[in-house]
Amino acid sequence: MEAIWRPCLSPNGICTRKSGRPFHQNVHLAVGSRSTRFASSRAAAAAASGSEFDVVVVGTGIIGLTIANRFLTSSDLSVAVVDSRVPCSGATGAGQGYIWMGHKKPGSELWQLAMRSKRLWEELAETIRDQGSDPLHVLGWKRTGSLLVGRSSEELESLKERVVSLKNAGLRAEYLRGNSLRSEEPALGEVGGAALVLDDCQLDAHLTVEFILKGNRSFGLQGRYAEFFNDPVVSLCRSESSGEVEGVQTSGNILKARRAVVVAAGAWSRALMRSLLTGSNSMLDIPVKPRKGHLLIIENFNKLQLNHGVMEVGYIDHQIATQAPGSSASEPPEHEQSFSSISMTATIDMFGNLVLGSSRQFTGFNTEVDQSIVNLIWRRAREFFPVLKGSPLDLCGNKSIRIGLRPYMDGGKPIISNIPGLPTVFLATGHEGGGLCMALGTAEMVCDMVLGNPGKVDWAPFSVQERYLRLLHVAELYKWKFRNMK
Ligand SMILES: Cc1cc2nc3c(=O)[nH]c(=O)nc-3n(C[C@H](O)[C@H](O)[C@H](O)COP(=O)(O)OP(=O)(O)OC[C@H]3O[C@@H](n4cnc5c(N)ncnc54)[C@H](O)[C@@H]3O)c2cc1C
């Protein structure tokens, strides 16, 4: 029987920890992100038998937190989460929040995962509603539908084809132009045509993380949950006799993991995996790169009203575009040139703020605001929404910028997998611009892998074996030859 994801709505959360530092210390959030209550000031006695757990999850972005939640709600395992900072301090805190299928390709390897994940988000919203709360207030959940808009004749042709394939995949989609488009979204200028996907939704990343954390913390009362913030993981702990991974060493703690260590450290996963694999003879290198994104938020901007989330069709190419010409997937990010692209996305969040995106850049781990990028985002939005033309950005009232480092992988596909040779270590990262959308499906997949359950979607496209094993074999062969030549 299929496991149903039951969120824990009880507000009696308890937050347990063993780190020597207080939670409220060093709370650095993505630039311009809202203040959070994630850094709890409540420190209860550590539960889950000292610092021994069944599962240790590294990283408390949306991926790590939903994985922890899934273990807590669908098994009786105990879970610790650990982060070098606090929840939402990575890409998650910057996410725009669209849970959209309109810009994804039916039949692609990502499609099944994204569809499954979206269904789980919808079930969660439904459960919240059944329990008497409004998912809008709890998660910022809105079923606005999405409009993918095009201007050139090629774009319009591609949108028509997209609508056909979305319908064939079972979604409610329509191709709109002229008056029908104008009446759906009056704020749009002369854009030619659009694909409307009626059931696309959005959420608020901060509210959602807050809700998931609260659910996780309620398991602290049963001694099944603990969290360690501002406490980076530095290495794996291995058994001296068998060499098996038995947990992680953080800057201040040793956290034992009886069943699994799950690494969900977003854009930092490559460097972290390298240090975790030091001394293990493994040449595995997962080429996750930080892909910087800016969002512009204009508070209570009533000049532009939107009925739907809106995205330009060019976003799809920007998202899958690989990288700066001349750089390669194996190059470390610090050697990369800056390479920027801007594509228009526009949503109204649950607070009535206009949220405009977004940029994509390979600039290593830099999270400084680049005003020229912000200006380009604004200029791009004005091309689609004429009402913005008469409003200089400087005069638009309270604004903020959110910046996040998307975990980018070549091909736009995440890695959700165990690590060859380390049967208790799992990796879940590389969701680039779709981590919020794909979080619940990813969490389910990781739990099924650890618990030995059959998968709801095919795991193969996301596995290390499938994508890197051949490369690894070649690399190991070279290493072996090199050793024998010496
Ligand atoms: C501008 C922008 C807009 C976006 N909009 C959307 C959207 O609308 N819809 C959507 O689906 N997705 C969107 N995304 C993408 C989405 O935000 C990401 O895919 C997702 O947040 C990735 O989550 P994560 O948990 O993998 O990584 P993160 O949120 O980056 O979390 C990784 C965590 O690992 C921690 N960590 C790192 N190193 C260590 C260590 N050594 N020890 C312990 N912890 C460590 C970090 O501190 C961090 O908290 C957007 C992203 C950006 C930047």
Image: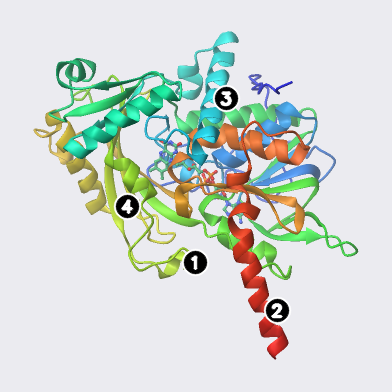
Whether disc 2's CB lies below 8 Å from ligand 1 is answered no
In the displayed structure image, the side of residue 374 where residue 189 appears, left or right: left
Visual colour scheme: rainbow
Do callouts 4 and 1 mark residues in contact (Cβ within 8 Å)? no
Reading the image, the residue beneath label 4 is 369
Q: Secondary structure at mark 3?
A: helix
User: Label 2 sits on what residue type?
Assistant: Trp
Of 151 and 331, which appears nearest the observer?
Answer: 151
Q: Quick check: 285 above or below 457? A: below
Between the C-alphas of marks 4 and 1, the distance is: 27 Å
Residue 37 makes an appearance in the image: no
- Return the disc, 1 or 2, that comes first in the chain's sequence: 1
Please tell me how crowded label 1 is: few (under 14), some (14-19), or many (20+) other residues with Cα within 10 Å: few
Between the C-alphas of marks 2 and 3, the distance is: 46 Å
User: Label 4 sits on what residue type?
Assistant: Val
Between the C-alphas of marks 4 and 2, the distance is: 46 Å
Residue 93 makes an appearance in the image: yes
Of 357 and 122, which appears nearest the observer?
Answer: 122
Reading the image, the residue beneath label 1 is 330
Whether disc 1's CB lies below 8 Å from ligand 1 is answered no
Reading the image, the residue beneath label 2 is 480
Reading the image, the residue beneath label 3 is 120
Between the C-alphas of marks 1 and 2, the distance is: 21 Å
Residue 285, percent from left and from top: 59, 63
- Return the disc, 4 or 1, that comes first in the chain's sequence: 1
Of 290 and 161, which appears nearest the observer?
Answer: 161
Q: Secondary structure at mark 4?
A: loop
